[in-house]
Amino acid sequence: MKKALFNWVLAVAASTAFLALPITASAEDNPKEIRIGISSAGVGGKPKVGYSSVTTAHLRGVLEDEFKKDGIKVVWRLFPGAGPATNEAFSNNQVDFGWHGDLPAIIGRSTGLKHKVIFAAGRFGPLYFVVPADSQAKSLADLKGKTISTFKGTALQLQQSRLFKKYGLKESDFRVISQDQFSSRTSLSTGDIDGTITSPWTLEARGVAKRILEIRDDKTLVAPLTFWVGEEFEKKYPHIVQRVTTALIKQAHWNSLEENREAQYKLWAQSGVPYLDWKKDWEGYDLKERHSPLLDENYIASMKQSAAEAKEFKLIRKDVDVDSWLEPKYLNTALKELNLEGFWPELDAQGNRKDGKK
Amino acid sequence: MKHNYKLAKAVTGALLVLSAGASSAFAATNEELEKQLEALQKTVESLKQQVQSQKVAVPENIATQDDVEGVRADLENYKYDESRLRERSTIKSTRDSTLFGVVQVRAQAQNEGTTAGNPAPTSNRSSTFDVPTALLGVRGNLYRDYVDGKNLDYQFSFTYSKRATAGATSDLNLADAFLRYNFTSTNGGPEIPRFNVTFGQQLLPFGQEAQSPEDLRPTINVSQASGRLGLFTRQVGAVIRGDVAPFVDYGANYRAPLAEYALGVVNGNVSNKVDDNNNKAIIGRAAFTLPVAYNSWLRELKAGASFYKGDKNVQLAGTNVDSHGKNDRYGFDIYYNHAPYGVTYEYIQGRDDFQVGATNTTKEAKSKGHTLTLFYTFGDQFYNSIKSVAKFDDWHPQSIQPFYRYDYFNPNDSNVTLGGSRGKGDDTVTVNTLGVNWFFAQTTKLQVGINHWNYETEKTLTGAKRKDFTELQAQFQYTF
């Protein structure tokens, strides 16, 4: 009996010791490293991504240069698991900043993830609906009852819902399954699915798929991307947040210059998406509009719409208040420091320039 | 084309001059004509040389026929190489299959000599090297439902075991041998409940540790209760498994079914045997997980209850005393894994009928075990996002996981000796373990543990002495 009692006491003591393992907090002025979560990865899981000024900064080593003199390491974590993986990493204190699509950022916020939106990091662009090469479908309506794939929990899910709505259809008209981008593209080739939203170029080059829809001019379909900072990191290192923001806004300026159009396509091709595909995707778009970091009416209205849609589709259980989520002071300071106030045009809720120019 | 035109123009000009010359040929002397002809020949030669010396200016950004042929040759070489490699250097199968394996290599030492082993060594040892597990298997797909994902899957594996006779040989025993059909969609998304049936030899869906495959067990030594009550032994039968009301947090790809269940019928005998009586064993389990988002501190909090109700042959000198002898197991478990912390607890009770003394009467022995495991992980091994992060090389997050385990087992709580165990809990064994798992490569870990074995009494049933002892174990485990 005594032995049994001793064993239980030992067990409880060990339990207490384990649960009391302290997590030491750094009291330094600067962090040892800055960890950035990117909700995407290159072809075949390559740690290089194109599309945005933030990912261009990664490719050009912009933040590494900025923090080299302070000995602060910049860690880029590119997640093939997309937005949900960034949320998982942030939940477990694995990233300080995040580059996110609208839906995963909204879901994360609704489940209590504490971060602050500091600027927009890419918006608009084409949307393609792609079907297997031998498909008889000519329109979305022809695919009623068929299997459509999307990556649930990512921005693609809301894009798909908006697309269905645009053509008077709804999710229940189809059998919608969840696959990551790599799987859905493979499934198009094997005929496992009847359609998905994806980039068509390499699939068409292989002759395994074709576009039945290409929409380039609807600014309500593709919501802006978001760059946020964790609240804890922001409270602890506001000066670092400012430097990160300023460096990335400078990068957004570089991306927005017409003279750098070809150069950025070439950089982005390191992701494994060919140069020509970037060229085709971005042709005809105003770089200033697409790389605008402004938290303008367009950004706010778009995020509010996404939050409402996420609630409507029962993807979130709690409301998300967009206004209290924004922290524009770092962006405003960066614009001032870089003399870029007024460089990017303010856009209204529909994505039209407020200055009336086209 | 332009150059051909020039040449034609020059030749035409020469001919015109020649024809013009011909008209006055009658007036010219032969010598003059020869001179004219010579001059014309020189002009033609000169023009020819001019044309030949001019390079064809091809724009740099346009591929020539040669470039295209070069690319095509590369492509054809690649295609040939691929097919040759597949033909000669690839293991092929008629169905989608994956080869997998688990190997453990171990060293251990203890402060009390032992002759444990099968066959028992003739002299004491206080240390040994060992290969406790080597398992090789194949799993895959027998039928793939492209529309709904209601697939038919299979798995079979073999594990080695030491022979109980003298010699250096070992046996290869069948471990898993089953096929599984999914009644619900496996490709429709995480919100769809799971429901499948597994037919064949398989692990039992009882508690926590017993249904974990070899590579996922957290400690070097398995829990005493699960081991000594036969719950790790694979059995042959049919088991349905599924879940209801899955809670899905799409924001983090997290799925937590409100309830999971398993219900099955098995032989009630050990692996690789036909049934040894006319009664089947029934096994069942239900577990409940809190439906909370991934970000909640209550995520992965699960409580479960299991039962196994079987009949066994109770024998006296090889003759059946009772073929309906009790062979029941009941269990309750709690699981909480909120990285970096984790706690698991498992209670298992056994109720077995044994023959009493040298009589035909039987009596029930109640056994019970508690297993508590606490762990804390330093590192990112258990975060899916970090594990799958994009990379060029073979980088994988390393983790160090210290753990503590309390493992108690009382084989006989009755007041008489039954089944080789003395009553009143005299054969109770408690093992306290402090250990660490170091995950240093994607599928490889080093486990080190110090176990303190504590016996309730110093004498065994036969009167032999046994002493409490402490052992140090170190083991590499790799999977592929």
Image (cartoon, rainbow, N blue to C red):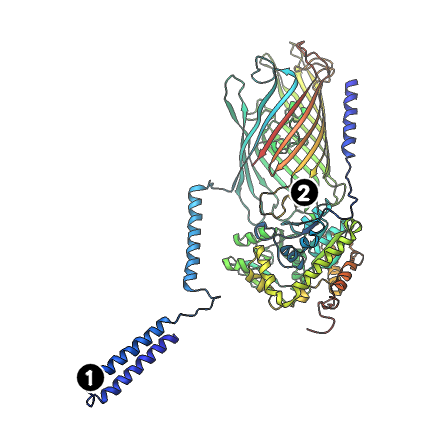
Percent coordinates x, y for residue B465 in the rendering: 68, 11
Q: Please state which of residues A249 and B339 is positioned toward the viewer in this rendering.
A: A249
At a point 62% along the width and 63% down the height, the residue shown is A126
Tell me if residue B127 comes above or below residue B187 in the rendering.
Answer: above
Residue A132 visible (yes or no): no
Q: Are marks 2 and 1 on the same chain?
A: yes
To which chain does the residue with label 2 belong? Answer: B
Task: Give the number of the disc on residue B31.
Answer: 1
Secondary structure under tag 2 reads loop
How far apart marks 2 and 1 lie (CA) works out to 101 Å
Q: Dot 1 lies on which element?
A: helix
Chain identifier of the residue bearing label 1 in the image? B
Amino acid bearing label 2: Tyr
As rendered, which of A299 and B37 lies closer to the eye?
B37
Q: Which mark is residue B383?
A: 2
Q: Residue B1 at what x, y percent from top left?
A: 38, 74
Name the quadrant of the N terminus of chain A: top right
The residue positioned 58% from the left and 64% from the top of the image is A279
Front position among marks 2 and 1: 1
Side of B123 where B339 appears, left or right: right
Question: Label 1 is placed on what type of residue?
Answer: Glu
